[in-house]
Amino acid sequence: MNVVSVLSPDKVPLMPCQPVIARLLLKEGKAKVRHRTPFTIQLLAHPEQVYTQPFTHGVDTGSAVIGSAVSDEDGNVVYLSEVHVRNDIATTMKERARARRNRRYRKKPATDLFAG
């Protein structure tokens, strides 16, 4: 479900709206684009009624994936995301160290082992 974030003229966050409503507000000149990523509009006139709603934010911290969700009182999900955690950093650092040691070893002058 796509939503557009909405700001009041005082830059106070309001309830998000659907893209259709945002397009109508922009076309009628009642709002302007504030940010492109994430897409956010700012109203130019104060709304007659400030509409906000309580949300619940849940975070699931796993070992490989961290999930985050925001839902309203009815249980409808408003925002959902997940972040994949990098678990390969220790292996990558060991590979870098091994390659660095190999480069240093190649640069050392060869000793004459057969000289008598």
Image (cartoon, helix red, strand yellow):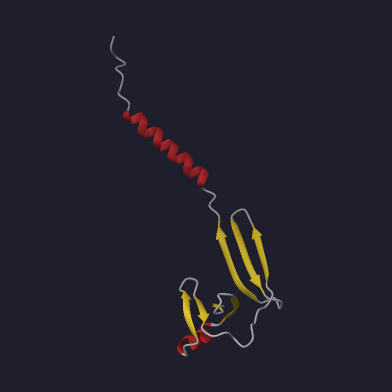
- Position in image of residue 98 (x %, y %): 43, 36
* Residue 12 in view of the camera: yes
Whether residue 4 can be seen here? no
Q: At 59% from the left edge and 75% from the top edge, which residue is drawn? A: 13
**Could you say which is closer to the camera, residue 88 or residue 6?**
6
On the picture, is 10 further left or further right than 105? right
Residue 11 image-quadrant placement: bottom right
Residue, far top: 116
Dividing the picture into quadrants, the one containing residue 1 is bottom right
Q: In this view, does 12 lie above or below 112?
A: below
Q: Where is residue 100 in the image (x, y as percent from the top left)?
A: 40, 36
Quadrant containing the C terminus in the rendered view: top left
Relative to 101, 59 lies left or right:
right
Question: Is 73 left, or right, of 95 in this rendering?
Answer: right
In this view, the residue in front, 116 or 94, is 94
* Image location (x, y in percent) of residue 80: 59, 69
Q: Which residue is drawn at 60% across and 72% down?
A: 79
Q: Which residue is drawn at 30% across and 22% down?
A: 110
Q: Is residue 14 left or right of residue 28?
A: right
